Structures are given as structure tokens and as C-alpha cells.
Amino acid sequence: MSTKVALLRVIHNKQRQHRPAGWTASPPLLWALCSQGNLVPYKMNEPQFEAVTALSSADRSSHFVGKVADLEQLWAVKNNEGWLVPVTSEELEYFPVWPHPEYAQRIADDHFPGHKAVEISLNEFLSHWWPNCEKDKVKIAVFPNKDWVFWVMEPQDLAQCLIEEAEQYE
């Protein structure tokens, strides 16, 4: 296990014990239909949105891994031209992902207007996105916040974290 993966696991386990202010439990059968026709796993409230987006990049990454492994879905954004894959000034391409469509939509609206949150199942991420990002040398930007600060991961490392975490829910 890489150091980054081990760090995420420690942070994630710590976060489960100390949840941020405004956190609401998400009953597994609570599903609401969002405007894009995707199933939303739980209703987001403003205190939860603010508390979770205020976490450090590492803690948001840990939150992301736990939510995605539990609910088996993640969210990215796209427009009519395709998926959002920004490029840094250092020529690093990255694919931003979030654990809930409201995080994705509200944060993308501030930075990349015209993009819409789209669900990606965990199975689709592991079978399609991970290998293609790996092949194309695209990093994963895990859970960018309102300031567009995020945890950068290699696709393989994120996939490993998600697989290991999902095994705990079986």
C-alpha cells in the first residue's frame, strides 16, 4: 500500500469518528431525483455543504472515498463539448470528481459555468475511467472545493482506495 493510500485510510477512519458540524446521516433508502434525472443519494443541507467544503484537501479526499465506496457513485461535470479535464500551467491534466452532485454543480458553476454534474457509477469508474485516465496520464482531482483546491491522486491510487473501502461495506 502506498504512503498516500495509507494516509487517506488513516484520515478516513479518523473522520468517521469526528464528523464535521452540520453533518447529517444519509439513510440508505433516501433518494431524491435531481434536475438532470440522476438519482441523488441524500439531500444536502447548507451547513453540511459549508462544513465539508471547508475541510482540508486530505480530509475532503477521505470523505470522498467513504461516500463513493458506500453509495457506489461519484460525480463529474461536462458540457456539450465533453467532460471537464482542465490543464494546469505545468501541463498537468486532471479529472475533477465529487461525492455528491450538489458539490460538483455548485463548485463547477463558480469556476466553469455551463457544465452540468453527471453521475458515474463506481463500477463504471473502475472499469472505464480509471484505466483510461491511467493510459492518458490524467490525474484525478479529488473533491475540489470553492477555492478550487483539491487532492491530486494517480488513478491507480484512487481506485485502490475505493476498492479497499468498498470491501468494508460488503
Image (spheres, rainbow, N blue to C red):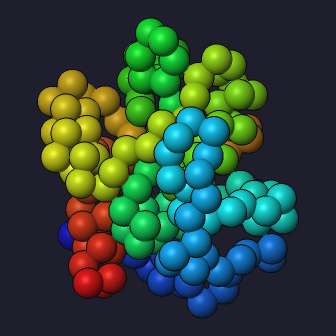
The image shows a total of numbered marks equal to 0
Q: Which of the pair 96/154 is nearer the observer?
A: 96
Q: Which of the pair 64/9 is nearer the observer?
A: 64
User: Is residue 149 among what the camera can see?
Assistant: no
- The percent position of residue 101, horizontal first and vertical second, equals 58, 46
| Quadrant location of the N terminus in the rendered image | bottom left
- The percent position of residue 99, horizontal first and vertical second, equals 52, 55
| Quadrant location of the C terminus in the rendered image | bottom left
Residue drawn at x 84%, y 65% is: 47
Depicted 121 relative to depicted 71: above or below: above
Residue drawn at x 28%, y 46% is: 125
- The percent position of residue 55, horizontal first and vertical second, equals 69, 62
* Farthest residue, direction right: 47
* Farthest residue, direction bottom: 17
Residue drawn at x 33%, y 82% is: 169
- The percent position of residue 97, horizontal first and vertical second, equals 47, 43
Q: Which of the pair 104/5 is nearer the observer?
A: 104
Residue drawn at x 71%, y 28% is: 109
Q: Which of the pair 80/87 is nearer the observer?
A: 80
Q: State which quadrant residue 128 falls in.
A: top left
User: Is residue 31 among what the camera can see?
Assistant: yes
